[in-house]
């Protein structure tokens, strides 16, 4: 019954957000990896403001590897935690050049060995750059919606939420569904919304939605 309900929710999200997509701008796997590292605790819009100049200055992983974190910093100063992120980007690109022939690896295990890359970032890169569904992206929006839609307990960790969504949702749609969840979370069922029950998805599935 729970799986059936989850599949109905998946269908409703697809119907409402057929054009949902990754809102980070990128043209290659390594650009998406850099943008995703920058996006932690930052908005996609904020990241998209800085990446055109950054990507122009460092067109390939080798260009990042040959630089220093201090040379990356000026391009990303407007992003929170920019010093740590410059270090992470530099280290990850250096490792990609030294260990993976300058190509972003296409497995979860290999991606997780890179500095600054946890499961969420790896899932974003695998799903969007390579069309590989090995996990379900869980960001703050998806975590909030999974609780409000009663797919996971209120105190579920990110790991628990990811495992649960992987069981409940059709695998071939994990990447696309993560975008549809995020679009709904950004546009309708926001963290601060007083009520979202007038939206058909929240009305039908939002057992713990406000209002």
Image (cartoon, rainbow, N blue to C red):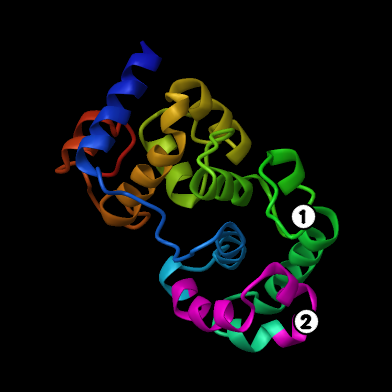
Choose mark 2 or mark 1, whichever is in front: 2
Do we see residue 193 in this rendering? no
Main SS class of the magenta portion in the image: helix
Q: Earlier along the polypeptide chain: callout 2 or callout 1? A: 2
Q: Nearer the viewer, residue 176 or 56?
A: 56
Q: Is residue 80 left or right of residue 50?
A: right
Q: Quadrant of residue 144?
A: top left
Q: Give me the disc on residue 114.
A: 1
Q: Is residue 61 left or right of residue 9?
A: right
Q: Nearer the viewer, residue 78 or 51?
A: 51
Distance from Cα at disc 2 to Cα at disc 1: 17 Å
Looking at the image, which residue is at 78% across and 56% down? Answer: 101
Q: Quadrant of residue 106?
A: top right
Q: Is residue 133 left or right of residue 24?
A: right
Do we see residue 11 in this rendering? yes
* First to last magenta residue range: 47-71
Q: Is residue 67 magenta?
A: yes
Q: Nearer the viewer, residue 44 or 190?
A: 44
Percent x, y of residue 199: 17, 43
Looking at the image, which residue is at 33% across and 15% down? Answer: 4
| Above or below, comparing residue 59 to residue 170 in the picture | below
Q: Quadrant of residue 147?
A: top left
Percent x, y of residue 200: 16, 37
Give the labeled residue for mark 2: 67
Looking at the image, which residue is at 34% across and 58% down? Answer: 192
């Amino acid at each position: 019954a729970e799986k059936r309900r989850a599949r109905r929710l998946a269908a409703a999200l697809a119907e409402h957000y057929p054009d949902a997509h990754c809102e980070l701008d990128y043209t290659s796997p390594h650009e998406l990896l850099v943008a995703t590292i920058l996006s932690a605790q930052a908005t996609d819009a904020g990241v998209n403001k800085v990446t055109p100049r950054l990507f122009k200055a460092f067109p390939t992983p080798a260009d990042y590897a040959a630089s220093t974190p201090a040379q990356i910093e000026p391009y990303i100063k407007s992003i929170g935690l920019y010093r740590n992120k410059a270090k992470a980007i530099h280290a990850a690109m250096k490792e990609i050049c030294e260990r993976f022939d300058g190509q972003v690896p296409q497995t979860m295990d290999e991606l997780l060995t890179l500095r600054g890359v946890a499961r969420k970032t790896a899932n974003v890169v695998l799903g969007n750059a390579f069309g590989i569904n090995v996990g379900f992206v869980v960001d703050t929006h998806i975590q909030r919606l999974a609780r409000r839609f009663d797919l996971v307990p209120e105190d579920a960790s990110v790991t628990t939420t990811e495992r649960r969504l992987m069981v409940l949702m059709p695998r071939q749609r994990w990447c696309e569904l993560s975008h549809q969840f995020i679009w709904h979370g950004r546009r309708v069922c926001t963290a601060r919304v007083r009520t979202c029950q007038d939206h058909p998805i929240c009305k039908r599935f939002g057992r713990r939605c406000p209002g």
